[in-house]
Amino acid sequence: MNGFLAAIRPPLSRLARDGRARAAAVVLLLVIGAALLAPLLAPYDPTAQLDIVRLQSRPPSWAHPLGTDQFSRDVLSRLMWGARISLAIAFVAVALSMTLGILVGAIAGYAGGLVDAVLMRLVDTALSIPRLLLLIAVVALWEHVGLAALTLLLAGTGWFTVSRLTRAETLVVREKDFVVAARMLGASPWRILTRHVLPNVAAPGLVAATLGIANVILLEAGLSYLGIGVRPPTASWGGIIQDGAERVGDLWWLTLFPGLAILLTVFACNALGDALRDALDPRQLPPPLGDDTSPQRR
Amino acid sequence: MRRYLGSRLLQAVGVVFLVTTLTFLLVHLAPGDPLGAALDRPGVTEAVRDQWRQQFGLDRPLGEQYLRWLANVPRGELGYSFSHRRPVRDVLLDAFPRTLLLVGLALTFSFALGIGVGVLQAERAGSPRDRWLGRVLLLLYSVPDFWLALLALLLFAYKIPILPAGGIVDPVLHDYLPFGRRVLDRLAHLVLPVLTLTVLSSAVIARHQRSSLLAVLPSDWMRTALAKGLSWRDAVRRHALRNALLSTITLVGLSLPALAAGAVFVEKVFSWPGMGMVTVSAIGARDYPLITAGVLIISVAVVLGALLADLAVAAADPRVRMR
């Protein structure tokens, strides 16, 4: 894995100097911290109906900073527990889809010929179908989709771009002298893949993963809002919004706060992804006006 | 051109075929009956169920059902919607123009807005203006579609009640209004959904427009334009913009999946009875034929839209045709 580390170090130090990336990292760490520590920090049980008579649909107060829902559950607690679900689904789904995408892309790029043509045609086709609609169809028809299945579905519909990236990189690397030399010396395809292809794909892959997490959080929230993602009573960000959607005029706190949580997390992921892309490929940066220290001016 | 057209057309047909097959597989692999909730009502005996299954050909071998489905889809025979008590085709035929109106208007506005913002950014790349616009765009890009729609609803229909909360027309008054007021009523119902969808999609377009402008700025012809005395502003707006517009046409096709997804949520929030809302509402009723047909038709529309965009690019740019 030394090749991987060597490929990733200079951009990482560039990233650490990027204010945008640092702000995004702080936000993400806060959200992840709140999610991990939810059992300790959350003031109430997220599914407990505290007092259906007196605490039903109360606006924010000192006892319940983000209000309660129509089942008298504490919204802040649900929000923190919801972060666990949303983030866990996103991280696992993206990890799976990255693995799958890299594998398929490397196989297509390395094998070439018919295998490549068939795989990439399939990927092109999959990319032209709206992902949300495909998910809606599957989840709605299967009716009782559990968390694991939902995660698998999100992973299974998210690997197409990564496989294209990996394939393109594999095609380039495959013809490089050092790879030809490695092959001559008898290196196995697996060794070439892990030692030479993966370090080169790591950079665009990392960007794709960061943006992918943002995307999956949005998709899961959307499905949960439609009532077919994470099922009640399990708390999820989209689900809380769904709880208040029918009476958005009265119960605005059920819409506002979980939405802000989604927005903040997704925004941080996207900002980090953008910063990462710039750090990995400084040539893409816009020419800074009057800044002579920039690596390359156009 | 003809060869390009042929291969592109073939590809689109392939995608449509695959989507059609996929929806068939979905319906038949899913647990439960393809007729969905229609058979679950109390009082429906097993004999009646069998009769219905027979009537809809569900007792035939799977291969035959698949071939029938393939033959039926192009003819618009998409099954029977139990929740609407009408053929699915009729339900979708009512809904499709409404979505087309919504998406068409949003697409037009968001391209005007997105290109404008992209030019403003690229003109002064790296300046505070560029950076701030970039942050706002990234924020809009990160907003959950349905949440922005709900916020718009909350703000402009409930807190400051200046616009109607949903639907196409006022359900009570519309028919009693004079002609001019009826037009106004329709327009007022369009404002919030179109505005939300426009804001959502213009963020994507502006981000793309900025980068495609930045890609052409270092060209030789830009240097020529500047050397002959054109101001930077004019060079960007007259020369660079035209060259970058080609990739913007491609973007129409690329942004259609996101736009379709956005339309699903926006329609749902504003009760706009288009394709998205009809499909999503069918989930609650477990109206499987309507769900699958809705997803199928929206996907096909997206694929055809992308095809049209690609053909437009080919018509405008000889380099694409020659490839």
Image (spheres, coloured by chain):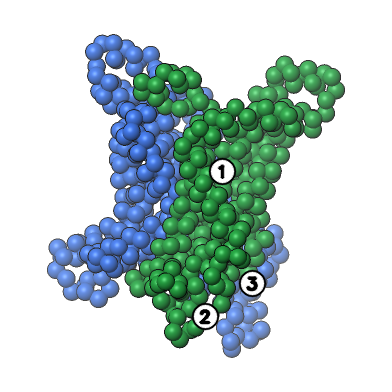
Chain colours: A green, B blue
SS class of the residue under badge 3?
loop
* Residue B247 position within the rendered picture, expressed as x and y whole percent measured from the top left: 42, 31
**In this view, B32 is above or below A218:** below
Disc 2 crowd, CA 10 A, few/some/many (<14, 14-19, 20+): some
In the rendered image, residues at marks 1 and 3 fall on the same chain: no
- Mark linked to residue B266: none
* Residue A105 position within the rendered picture, expressed as x and y whole percent measured from the top left: 67, 36
**In this view, A251 is above or below A237:** below
- Mark linked to residue B33: 3
- Which mark sits nearer the N-terminus, 1 or 2? 2
Tell me if A185 is positioned left or right of B303 in this view. Answer: right
**In this view, B221 is above or below A277:** above
For label 1, the residue is A210
Name the quadrant of the C terminus of chain A: top left
Give the residue at x 68% y 31%. A5
Q: Is residue A17 visible?
A: yes
Mark in front: 1 vs 3: 1
Host chain of mark 2? A
